[in-house]
């Protein structure tokens, strides 16, 4: 059988939305959480609280959905240490525990708000050693029953101003 997967933000996970998703035949929800560090979420204008992210997971489980979380390393104000700690919380804290995860490093794309932070030196992409270290630590922290579906975003390397351009880094 084929299942429908719907991708959304945690603040859009409501009983009404989940009922509609079930009506459409969805069986899995992908939730773009990006970080579990409130300071990083705020700095990146995510406009969401950790409590609301936890509530999204709780509701999705209550409605019987598989949960596929998106986690992004190297966001503005993140560090390799905060990325490892955030991912560890995602895969070990009872409020979260997704069935599946995507781990992406942030890529600098022209025309985004991150360009200003890059230009003024307040954000830089992790070098390859730092990035591989974060991804390796995150893989090791992920329980064997949690599927890691992707580790690198599939942007054209021509669109990436700076950051990882190796789509086969995994």
Image: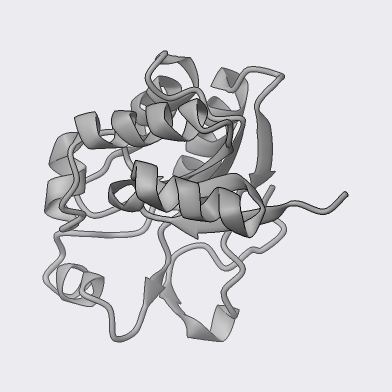
- Judged left or right of residue 165, residue 84 is left
The image shows residue 14, relative to residue 38, as above or below, that is below
Across and down, in percent, residue 65 comes to: 58, 36
Across and down, in percent, residue 126 comes to: 39, 52
The image shows residue 39, relative to residue 116, as above or below, that is above
Q: Residue at x 59, y 23 (%)?
A: 142
How many labels, in total? 0
- Judged left or right of residue 115, residue 89 is right
The reply to whether residue 103 is in sight is no
- Judged left or right of residue 3, residue 68 is left
Across and down, in percent, residue 98 comes to: 53, 29
User: For residue 27, which quarter of the picture?
Assistant: top right
102, 106: nearer the viewer: 102
- Judged left or right of residue 140, residue 49 is left
56, 111: nearer the viewer: 56
Q: Residue at x 49, y 45 (%)?
A: 131
User: For residue 153, which quarter of the picture?
Assistant: bottom right
The image shows residue 152, relative to residue 31, as above or below, that is below
The way the protein has been coloured in the rendering is one colour
Q: Residue at x 68, y 56 (%)?
A: 4
36, 85: nearer the viewer: 36
The reply to whether residue 4 is in sight is yes
Across and down, in percent, residue 71 comes to: 44, 44
Q: Residue at x 40, y 52 (%)?
A: 17
32, 13: nearer the viewer: 13
User: For residue 108, which quarter of the picture?
Assistant: bottom left
């Amino acid at each position: 059988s084929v299942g429908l997967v719907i991708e959304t933000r945690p603040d859009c996970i409501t009983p009404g939305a989940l009922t509609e998703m079930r009506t459409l035949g969805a069986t899995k929800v992908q939730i773009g959480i990006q970080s579990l560090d409130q300071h990083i979420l705020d700095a990146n204008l995510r406009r969401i609280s950790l409590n609301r992210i936890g509530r999204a997971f709780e509701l999705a489980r209550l409605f019987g959905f598989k949960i596929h979380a998106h986690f992004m390393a190297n966001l503005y104000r993140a560090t390799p240490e905060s990325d490892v700690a955030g991912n560890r919380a995602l895969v070990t804290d009872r409020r979260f525990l997704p069935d599946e995860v995507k781990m992406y490093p942030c890529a600098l794309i022209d025309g985004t708000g991150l360009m200003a932070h890059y230009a003024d030196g307040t954000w830089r992409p992790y070098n390859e050693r730092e990035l591989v270290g974060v991804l390796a630590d995150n893989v090791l922290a992920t329980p064997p029953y949690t599927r890691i579906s992707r580790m690198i975003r599939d942007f054209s390397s021509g669109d990436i101003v700076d950051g990882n351009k190796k789509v086969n880094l995994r």
